[in-house]
Image (cartoon, grey):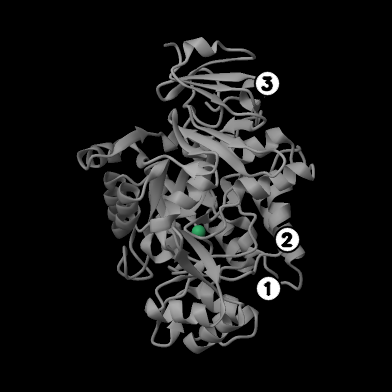
């Protein structure tokens, strides 16, 4: 048989190959082998009639959380249902990430950044270059593709943060920094300081919208405008932003205080004391929503039921606050520079275990309102993310690409099916995939394969973080 799977029907939207229209997609094994208006179903072991669905390059979500603290045992199913084919776990911790990837895998490709967190993976808030170097080397050997600096939640000093970015840059490893330090918070001031800390270096700044909630300036609009202006001036920084209203942070309290600075800020924002009692009151009132595992997914609950769920788990839960104003979310998703190119490179969800895996559903809402063209939707949810990871066989569906495909109902914006590496993961709303393929660097392959993982080596140094943006955003990823 020429094709192991043939996608028949549907509307293919693949801007990197200049295709938009009725095409059949022929897959053999884990790759796309032929794309044409009409392919012979007789040459296929299996024909999938995809009806009126849009067929887009597999969605790559560059910002998810799958660790225990976030309720990660449900994350893989939640992502698969949301049409995600490939995801980057923004911060581990590695052992939890890899444990759930082994036990709870829903058939996706996954990569991870290991966290640099005072008291956990580094001794204190001011680790030396030597200590950071050792953390990075260990993490790469385990299979992570780089480091996540958790400033906004668990800050380090600005000097140490800069050292961590330098160490990662020297190794050409991935590095992302949730802005904030011992001197600034997770807000527009923290964002401005992050850009300054990254001067002359390469850095991924996650969730651009989240620094712009109107905490410092009077209007969120002024904050997102400042953030976008800074990103336009500092193209050494790559970035993503999310579309959901809720944020995601930790509900854990020690000695009567929420351990995360972000949680403290969210309480203050609505006039609650930044204490355990304040958090309990906010949960009861519905300002804080507890992330609870119900029916194999994590959902937001509030009120007494939520207080009980949080207490029963010793406060070790995720908590979500509806703190993201639309002006920040929508501008981060759609704003362009003077050359007409997007300022923020990707739409990511900051979801996974957090119930906000809305890249497809909310991204498609932007398409329906003509804020994004279908091609731009693909650019932001797959093509640019593939470039950012350094994976040129993803982000498009040309002959020779990976057979990662997301199908979407164009009317509702709901994912209808997905394939990852040529295997069905989602089909008509049912999850049919299992296992995980780990995207790793050359340094991590041996250890992962000895633990029985299927791996795929990517080259972060050849990705957008280190090589910059292409002059034509719709060109094939190099
Ligand atoms: Zn995050």
Q: Nearer the viewer, residue 381 or 345?
A: 381
Residue at (48%, 27%) from the top-left corner? 403
Looking at the picture, does residue 313 appear above or below residue 11?
below
Q: Which residue corresponds to mark 2?
A: 326
Q: Which residue corresponds to mark 3?
A: 22
Label 2 residue SS: helix
Residue at (39%, 66%) from the top-left corner? 69
Q: Which mark is nearer the camera, 1 or 3?
A: 3
Q: Are marks 2 and 3 in contact (CB under 8 Å)?
A: no
Label 1 residue SS: loop
**Rendering quarter of residue 53:** top right
Q: Nearer the viewer, residue 328 or 146?
A: 328
Dot placed on the residue nearer the N-terminal end, 1 or 3: 3
Q: Which mark is nearer the camera, 2 or 1?
A: 2
* Distance CA(mark 2)–CA(mark 1): 17 Å
Label 3 residue SS: loop
Instruction: Inspect this view and state whether residue 233 appears.
Output: no
Q: Which residue corresponds to mark 1?
A: 216
Q: Residue 453, position in %: x, y?
A: 28, 39
Q: Residue 214, position in %: x, y?
A: 70, 70
Q: Are marks 1 and 3 in contact (CB under 8 Å)?
A: no
């Amino acid at each position: 048989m020429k094709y192991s799977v043939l996608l028949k029907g549907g509307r293919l939207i693949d801007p990197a190959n200049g295709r938009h229209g009725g095409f059949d997609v022929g897959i053999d094994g884990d790759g796309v082998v032929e794309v044409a208006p009409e392919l012979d179903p007789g040459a296929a072991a299996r024909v999938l009639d995809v009806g009126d669905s849009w067929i887009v390059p597999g969605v790559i979500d560059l910002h998810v959380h799958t660790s225990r603290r976030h309720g990660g045992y449900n994350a893989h199913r939640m992502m698969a249902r949301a049409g995600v084919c490939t995801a980057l776990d923004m911060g581990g911790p590695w052992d939890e990430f890899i444990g759930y990837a082994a036990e709870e895998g829903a058939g996706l490709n996954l990569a991870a950044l290991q966290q640099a967190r005072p008291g956990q993976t580094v001794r204190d808030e001011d680790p030396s270059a030597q200590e950071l170097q050792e953390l990075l080397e260990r993490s790469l050997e385990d299979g992570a593709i780089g480091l996540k600096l958790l400033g906004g939640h668990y800050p380090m000093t600005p000097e140490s943060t800069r050292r961590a970015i330098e160490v990662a840059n020297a190794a050409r490893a991935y590095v992302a920094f949730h802005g904030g330090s011992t001197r600034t918070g997770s807000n527009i001031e923290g964002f401005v300081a992050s850009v300054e800390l990254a001067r002359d270096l390469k850095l991924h700044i996650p969730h651009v919208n989240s620094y712009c909630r109107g905490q410092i300036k009077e209007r969120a609009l002024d904050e997102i405008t400042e953030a976008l202006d800074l990103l336009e001036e500092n193209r050494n920084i790559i970035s993503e932003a999310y579309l959901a209203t809720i944020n995601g942070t930790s509900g854990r309290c020690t000695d009567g205080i929420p351990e995360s600075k972000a949680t403290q800020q969210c309480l203050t924002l609505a006039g609650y004391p930044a204490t355990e009692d304040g958090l309990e009151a906010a949960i009861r009132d519905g300002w804080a929503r507890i992330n609870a595992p119900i029916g194999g997914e994590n959902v937001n609950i509030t009120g007494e039921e939520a207080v009980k769920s949080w207490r029963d788990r010793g406060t070790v839960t995720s908590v979500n606050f509806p703190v993201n104003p639309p002006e920040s979310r929508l501008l981060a998703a759609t704003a362009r520079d003077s050359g007409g190119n997007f300022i923020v490179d990707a739409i990511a969800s900051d979801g996974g275990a957090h119930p906000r895996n809305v890249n497809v559903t909310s991204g498609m809402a932007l398409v329906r309102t003509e804020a994004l063209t279908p091609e731009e939707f693909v650019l932001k949810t797959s093509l640019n993310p593939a470039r950012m990871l350094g994976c040129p066989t993803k982000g498009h569906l040309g002959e020779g690409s990976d057979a990662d495909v997301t199908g979407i109902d164009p009317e509702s914006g709901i994912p209808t099916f997905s394939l990852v590496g040529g295997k069905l993961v989602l089909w008509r709303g049912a999850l049919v995939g299992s296992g995980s393929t780990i995207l790793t660097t050359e340094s991590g392959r041996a250890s992962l394969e000895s633990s029985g993982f299927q791996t795929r080596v990517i080259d972060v140094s050849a990705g957008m973080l280190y090589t910059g943006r292409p002059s034509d955003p719709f060109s094939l990823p190099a």
